[in-house]
Image: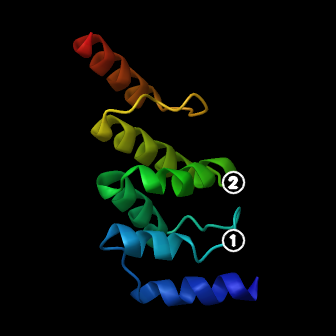
Amino acid sequence: MLFLFAIVAQLSTAHAGTSSEAIQLLSRFPAGAVPEIPEVLDAVDQLGQKAQTGELALLESLVKHESGAVRSSATDAIARIRARLGLAPSPDAVLPLDAYVAELVVTEVKE
């Protein structure tokens, strides 16, 4: 527990400006212990905006091991990456309703 407090204390000056910084910030936490704090949610959002397929594994791990806002943000980020890169939704993904509808619309327009 002390380890987690030390990491959170360091985050007061952390800011995820690039995908690599976002990955570095998110990898500081053990699986299942990623805190729901603005810096973490910003890092997940940053990945959703700029990441490529290589970062999907990290986001999928967050969906699998985390809960609440972290899981929801990771799910949204995965949907944004897949939509931006023209990838089909992951068969294991649980997409929020708005992302699911967007996927349907894009699929119908392409056909």
Q: Which residue is mark 1?
A: 30
Q: Position of residue 59 (x, y in %)?
A: 52, 53
Q: Is residue 80 left or right of residue 40?
A: left
Q: Nearer the viewer, residue 1 or 55?
A: 55
Residue drawn 57% across and 82% down?
Answer: 8
SS type, badge 1: loop
Numbered tag placed on residue 65 in the rendering = 2
How far across and down, in percent of the image, does residue 84 sit? 28, 40
Q: Does residue 69 appear anywhere in the picture?
A: no
The circle on residue 21 is none
In the image, what residue type sits under mark 1?
Answer: Pro
Image quadrant of residue 79? top left
| Image spot of residue 97 (x, y percent) | 45, 26
Question: Looking at this view, is 91 or 10 the one in front?
Answer: 91
Q: Is residue 98 visible?
A: yes
Sequence-first tag of 2 and 1? 1
Query: Is the residue 19 above or below the residue 9 in the image?
Result: above
Determine the image quadrant of residue 70: bottom right
